[in-house]
Image (cartoon, coloured by chain):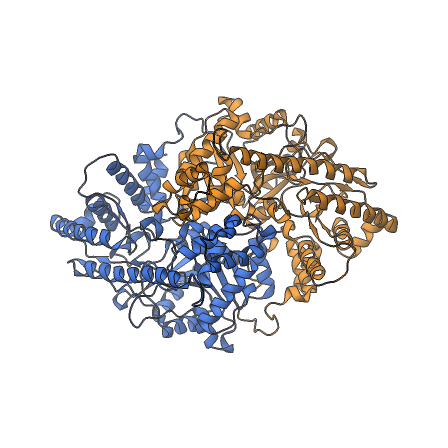
Chain colours: A blue, B orange
Amino acid sequence: MTNTVEMWSVRGVFSLTGRVRHAAQQSNLSRPRGINAQRRGAKVLTLDTMNPNVKKMEYAVRGPIVQRAVQIQDELNSGTKKPFEEVVRANIGDCHATGQQPLTFIRQVLALCTYPELLKDDKFPADAKDRAERILDDCGGRSMGAYTESGGIRVIRQDVAEYIRQRDGFESNWESISFSTGASESIKSILELLNTTGPNGEQTGVMVPIPQYPLYSATLAEYNMFQIGYFLDEDNHWSLTNKELQRSLEAAKSQCLPKAIVVINPGNPTGQVLSKANIQDIIKFAKKEGLFILADEVYQQNVYAEGCEFHSFKKVLCEMGKDYSDVQLASFMSTSKGFMGECGLRGGYCEVMHIDDEVMLMFNKLNSAKLCSNTHGQAAMECVVNPPKPSEPSYELFTQEKNDVLKSLRAKASIVKETFDSIDGVSCNAIQGSMYCFPQLDLPQKLVDHAKSKNMHPDAFYCFELLENTGLCVVPGSGFGQVDGTHHFRCTILPQEEQFRSVMKRFETFHNDFMKQWR
Amino acid sequence: MTNTVEMWSVRGVFSLTGRVRHAAQQSNLSRPRGINAQRRGAKVLTLDTMNPNVKKMEYAVRGPIVQRAVQIQDELNSGTKKPFEEVVRANIGDCHATGQQPLTFIRQVLALCTYPELLKDDKFPADAKDRAERILDDCGGRSMGAYTESGGIRVIRQDVAEYIRQRDGFESNWESISFSTGASESIKSILELLNTTGPNGEQTGVMVPIPQYPLYSATLAEYNMFQIGYFLDEDNHWSLTNKELQRSLEAAKSQCLPKAIVVINPGNPTGQVLSKANIQDIIKFAKKEGLFILADEVYQQNVYAEGCEFHSFKKVLCEMGKDYSDVQLASFMSTSKGFMGECGLRGGYCEVMHIDDEVMLMFNKLNSAKLCSNTHGQAAMECVVNPPKPSEPSYELFTQEKNDVLKSLRAKASIVKETFDSIDGVSCNAIQGSMYCFPQLDLPQKLVDHAKSKNMHPDAFYCFELLENTGLCVVPGSGFGQVDGTHHFRCTILPQEEQFRSVMKRFETFHNDFMKQWR
């Protein structure tokens, strides 16, 4: 036991591995089943005998600070006095949980599909009914309870292809689109397809931005693949330079077989939006180095900054013409983000390009052994990619609800950046897109040393103090990766505006006091 | 190319690997993207360079015979004359697709959760509304669009625990219950936790019944684990003997590190229901050999035969007392089967027993990196484990709909078994439970030789001919595993009674003619 706990300590409390150590200190979290009461010798599955790759995984977004936030909210609910009245959850892109409302049309269509008796009900608009009929016509037995084809309901895949065609101006083949349980599952499947071991035991290398969304580091650990971190340039709006791509790749070549590059655009946790020139450079780099591109484009509808525009990798790759037809691409989309924020429905898809038919059959086989993704996630995506048209009764309300969400996100993107940036010892790039910012903290050396003596990342120490004093829950930068010696945190722009304005005031007071205390 | 196709041929058309070969012969299926039109040299992901474990996977239930069935139905729809009017899909346990109706209460609750505006609607019964409120109260922002905790919505996990307690008479801890996207995902996660490589490169061995549900063989191939097949005793109602367990384990010990045993009860594809004594024997065997038990109990509500009863492994293990507290167990349940048949909703959970806290935290971490399972699957499970009570308005309809489904399945279990068994050259065990039978075919040697000369499994050859002549789509036994030299097919009992009776007549005529032809 001691041994294992020590191993965890090295990783610090901000890994989920570290969560174990933290949980072990919180008796109410840690002992659902009594460890000591049981004989242990004969058990086949123990911490020592289990899959070591799963042990290595870390997933900061749902780490111990979130568990502490839940406890604090429970304490508040049961009457404990705190310097704040509620916990503000800015740790995860969970839109509806922070007050965003679902779009009426999406929910009407889903309700109609779920309980077709409602198709007789006058309260539902005709276009929502037509849409539900369109979906049900393509479901076995006209039921959301039937398995779909492994790749998804055919008519929805066709509508996704049409959405992509209109977005990019290039053809999209519906058979290249596969639905999954959230985009995460597609991302994992593509990484799994790429994963091999070299003739001398080399791991498959995947280039990942630093800072990155921890799904990537977690999955690479789970699959025993090699993470090649390339740093985004914080001084330059978190942009991506070919020089850094080349540096990181060269440094890794002796340690693995590099096969792929992940790009998150708009960025998570960094909020930047890539220019077309930047994307062209990445594609050229991928061609030169023989890398598969995973384009995480789940925030494609979340672009706020003047002069910024979303360019899909698919479009830019098509524009680059036949010379690039050996550059392979998978692009990912989700119902969880954008203006809909339907995280719990777990809708997602990927579109692949330049994949040989035989490989596509293998990908379909991998999906078919999971049977299919859930029908409600697919149906929600249908409403997103094929929204009501101007002539249809739901158009006006849909457009208004969509614009309201995006307008509010745009406003909060400004408030949050400006507030953080105006505070001494905090600097924050503009939030050009996505739902996050990743401000840098200039922490006093005394605090850094103190945190390290407690085996904590300094930014983790800061974030815990922030939570205890203001109720604001954010994720320490160490969970995403950052240049050594720098300190950050990720903050979503999702809490409602009023709540945000009030917590931002508490943030400023806390920060100034805290810096004074440690200077 | 030639090389690869030859490799596939060896595996025969009834693997999904084989599907490639089959598809290559069907030009309309095989060429969504032009193979030859593209440069291939520089591509990083090809059939030669991809993950070899994914290539090895086979998944018969969605194999080429199903693709042919789809084509035949399309031909019928466009006016082609056949000796039958429709394809009868008895290849997959897809209840709603074959005409089973969803339960009203389940769909009402899901519609209310999806579109809470309906909570004001008088047409919905009060208990459905209460249930929806109960679920929404535990969702972030009272929305099905919020992420749930990784293990699932808390109140639903608590209701699952109560269902298990009432079923078994032993406590169940809600924290030991984790939701997943269908039971398949939980099964895969538990296998992943168990997977390690031994000090000399040994694979982790998992005992799997033969015949088995192909999720197991597919996942073991995907994870590069070792399948230890133990044969079910066809002469004895597909029961399971300790002698065979021991034989298969001993034979495998030199080839792998055995760690787990899978038991499917009620059986898929074999339809048997294990006696309590049989389960006790398996648990004793698992204890003696240090094996983790995976109890696939997704058909726990599907028991038809007089004198048969479902006994959960959890209950039997609890009854065996403290001496067995080192026997580790995971039990799986699904919304896809039972009386609800909600396959497309992808609801599933597993309950684990005797797992150390630290391992449980690792399991939760693995789940949390996928964020959560979909909310509709969870909400459907809530209705299954916590049905309306006698005092509530939906009780009567719910009970009637449930009983109608189970009564119809019971009736079809008899029809199907009796029809098959009455035909010369076919023998079929009683369908005690689940939704399948696995009849044996006594095929003439001339046919066997002919099929082999065409590189096909003889039962596959038979099933294709059956499909072409009768419209009945079943899955060849070779996709599930069988004693060498025997031939079977799996047939569901899901098609509607009238349809079944008529296709069974065509089956008999076909079979007699076919046997005459080849004798």
Q: Count every numbered label the image shows and give the total.
A: 0
Q: Position of residue B267 (x, y in %)?
A: 64, 37
Closer to the camera, B131 or A303? Answer: B131
In the picture, measured across the screen, residue A430 lies left or right of residue B66, that is left
Residue B85 in the image: above or below residue B303:
below
Q: Position of residue B328 (x, y in %)?
A: 50, 32
Q: Position of residue B235 (x, y in %)?
A: 75, 33
Asked whether residue A4 appears in the rendered view, the answer is: yes
**Location of residue B200 by image quarter:** top right
Query: Which quadrant: the N terminus of chain A?
Result: top left
In the picture, measured across the screen, residue A475 lies left or right of residue B166, that is left
Q: Position of residue A161 (x, y in %)?
A: 51, 66
Closer to the camera, A82 or B288? Answer: A82
In the picture, measured across the screen, residue B63 lies left or right of residue A50, that is right
In the picture, measured across the screen, residue A19 lies left or right of residue B207, that is left
Asked whether residue B180 appears in the rendered view, the answer is: no
Closer to the camera, A291 or B512? Answer: B512
Task: Please give the name of the residue rendered at 77% of the width and 58% of the height, measured from the top-left corner.
Answer: B82
Residue A231 in the image: above or below residue B388:
below
Task: Please give the name of the residue rendered at 30% of the width and 41% of the height, measured from the top-left corner.
Answer: A70
Residue A286 in the image: above or below residue A478:
below
